[in-house]
Amino acid sequence: MKVLKFGGSSVASSENIKKVLNIVANTSQNHKVAVVVSAFGKTTNGLIECATLASKKDDNYTIVLQKVITHHLDVIKELIPVKEQDEVINYVKELFNRLETLYQGAYLLQELTPKTLATISGFGELLSSYIIAKAANTRFTTSYKDSRELLIASDDYLGALVNFKLTNKNIQNHFKQDTANVTLLPGFVARTTTGE
């Protein structure tokens, strides 16, 4: 198995994502492939900026957030066939609704805890990986796996350490059963042993 990791600039635009999908399609002809993707370029910075603004009771966080939302919806419209867009858009909007709830909490409390910041910081990967997996499926068969079901880490939210014993066991068990030639996963996210 090969693991391919694509950072934010590699998935910053629809054009770049098409190039990534070409690389994955070519590589998967000869190997089983796990594809790990970052958030779309500059998304994580935007999400953190929103969190900081919200915690300072600065309403401008909504303007920054709207730019992030618009970029994701544009990518969906450019990569996903029209008949399949509704499902993807609904899922993405659900994630953004959860994110908005976190921002409203930070706004009302005027507080941004390490746990909340870590949670917010991982949304970009959850969004991008889902969208890219759906785009990939229009070209070749791809399974999607949430990395939080595989990676176990400590609860030091802004400096978490991987529990390799549990993580390696989870990964081995999953990929023994995963028959897909291409599995797409979000980078940057994990769960604690208690499921957080």
Image: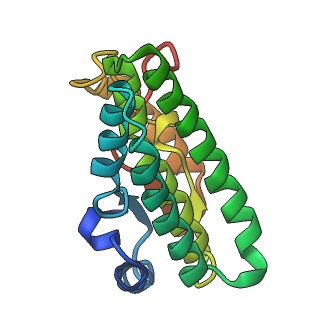
**x%, y% of residue 1?**
37, 62
Q: Nearer the viewer, residue 27 or 60?
A: 60
Image x and y of residue 123, in percent = 45, 44
Q: Residue at x 65, y 53 (%)?
A: 93
Look at the picture and state if 104 lies above or below 125. Answer: above
Figure disc tally: 0
The type of colouring in the image is: rainbow
Q: Give me the residue at 44% from left, 26% from top.
A: 191
Residue projecting furthest to the left = 159
Residue 2 position (above or below residue 58): below
Residue 189, x across and y down, in percent: 39, 38
Dividing the picture into quarters, in which one does residue 40 lie? bottom left
At x 50% / y 13%, what residue is drawn?
A: 194
Of 82 and 181, the residue lying toward us: 82
Q: On the picture, is 98 further left or further right than 39?
A: right
Q: Is residue 176 above or below residue 18?
A: above
Rendered location of residue 68, percent (x, y): 44, 58
Residue 168 appears in the picture as rendered: no
On the question of residue 173 being in view, the answer is yes
At 74% across and 75% down in the image, what residue appears? 84
Q: Is residue 166 left or right of residue 92?
A: left
